Image (cartoon, helix red, strand yellow):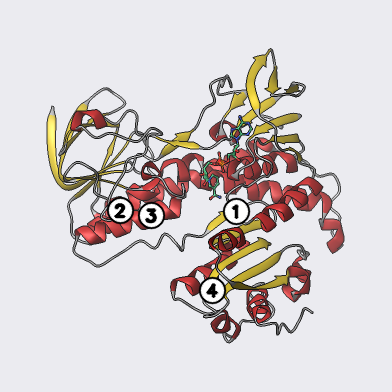
Amino acid sequence: MKSIRHDLVILGGGPGGYVAAIRAAQLGMNVACIDENSRFGGTCVRVGCIPSKALLESSHLYHEAKYRFADHGLQIGDLQLDLATMMRRKDQIVDTLTGGIDMLFKQRGVTPYCGRGELRDAESVEVTDADGVTTLVEGDKILLCPGSRPASLPMVEEDGDRIGNSTTALSFPEVPERLVVIGGGYIGLELGSVWNRLGSEVIVLEALDRVLAGIDSELAQLAHRTFKKQGIEFRTKTFVESAKRDGDKCVVAIKDGDPITCDRVLLATGRTPATGDIGLSSIGLETDRRGFISVDDDFQTGVKNVYAIGDCIGGMMLAHKAMEEGTVFVERLAGIASHMNYDVIPAIIYTHPEIASVGKTEDELKEAGIEYRKGVCPFGANGRARTLGEPDGRVKILADKKSDRVLGVHIIGARAGDLIAEAAAAIEFGASSEDIARTCHAHPTLSEAVHEAALAVDNRPIHTL
Ligand code: NAI
């Protein structure tokens, strides 16, 4: 077997791995990045964030053309949905972006290895490519970032076709007449929205008494109401016991309820770390019960010179969290005083309207007994939102009652995902709500709703009462 040595060997070419590889190369390291896929970018670029956002955009435009163009005086006659073209567009975006990573690796001098990687010892990974050829990739340091996979449920019989996960739901060959979504979380609502807009009857089954369990409960309630108005049916406190194929149909069994027959099932009940088959036992590294690897502040695992970042170490399973960890890990390795601030990781749900949060939720502040002031601006009071035809939603700013320091910002409304960046910067810099209120925001922009919410913290909003 051929063996090649590097300063740093990265196992996993998703957002955590490829960003760490590029940063390491920038810092002068001889770095290798291994991925079992022929295309780098991981779940995020290939079968996650990027293709889902492509479909969210296309389906949104379809929905706008069908129901809202007329408000603008635009009559377009007989609107046709060409699903195959929509899917091709999505695939082309993925191709362009994965090709972009290949190009960046080349320009920066990162050595890519495409093949299944398995740890042999604490300084080598055996890579087996698609033709079965193996290479021993050795490194002074090894960074594990294998990411995560969709979690399965024991009684849900996934066949990768009619009963499948988020990857399956990104490529349905036709619009299902009735789609049952198991799980009212990020994936359930994003992909549920796509197929609802394209014409499916979508039923979301959620075990808990609310959807979007992790986010600010006031926003989650608003979101629930909005998606219901859009035609998605929600059944909360509904625990799915099994799902089975029955010919071309599927039958979903529910605890204490009637079974539901549908055309397709999307299982979206969370993700699980992909740590089971990367050879951890060969270096004596154990995971916790759920498969997560524990690390210290330098991302060092229990084994010297072996490190881990991203979904496999737990915390928020978000691409940008993994990217940040990859950067911080490599910079610390190079002696740069870099650190992670887990208190400022924005989270966005790309439904329509979008939902975006950063910092503490109101529920968390109440629970911790922290006194706060709250400022709210409804988008209905924002001129730009009106011109966009997007008056629904609000910006909510939570600031410490004594110091006025911004503790949390929660937005539901058009382009909330872009607006949250200002809030993240404010919290990162330790800004007060007064700092945001004293910052001139361009008119007419949606960002003025953030400004107005900051004014409202001090009870002096201009455009709302
Ligand atoms: P999730 O954890 O957000 O939601 C899963 C839901 O399924 C929970 O509310 C849970 O109560 C429910 N559930 C579990 N078992 C059930 C059962 N038997 N019957 C009915 N309901 C049941 O997980 P999701 O949506 O699969 O997303 C996975 C990960 O991917 C998340 O950690 C998320 O952060 C990430 N993601 C992020 C996106 C973004 O940043 N926009 C988009 C998509 C995914």
Q: Give the x, y percent position of residue 237.
A: 70, 36
Residue 323, numbered circle: 3
Instruction: Give the Cα separation between the discs numbered 2 and 4.
Output: 31 Å
Residue drawn 59% across the image and 48% down it: 54
Q: Earlier in the sequence, mark 2 or mark 4?
A: 2
Q: Give the x, y percent position of residue 297.
A: 28, 55
> Answer yes or no: do the residues labelled 2 and 3 have beta carbons within 8 Å?
no
Instruction: Give the Cα separation between the discs numbered 1 and 2.
Output: 29 Å
Instruction: Give the Cα separation between the discs numbered 1 and 3.
Output: 22 Å
Q: Earlier in the sequence, mark 2 or mark 3?
A: 2
Q: Secondary structure at mark 1?
A: loop
Q: Earlier in the sequence, mark 1 or mark 3?
A: 1
Question: In the figure, is residue 70 to the left or right of 356?
Answer: right
| Badge 1 density bin: few <14, some 14–19, many ≥20, Cα 10 Å | many
Q: Earlier in the sequence, mark 4 or mark 3?
A: 3
Residue in the foreground of this view, choosing between 331 and 238:
238
Q: Report the residue marked by disc 1.
A: 215
| Badge 3 density bin: few <14, some 14–19, many ≥20, Cα 10 Å | many
> Answer yes or no: do the residues labelled 1 and 2 have beta carbons within 8 Å?
no
Q: Earlier in the sequence, mark 1 or mark 4?
A: 1
Q: Is ligand 1 within 8 Å of the beta carbon of the residue shown at mark 1?
A: no
Residue in the foreground of this view, choosing between 245 and 78:
245
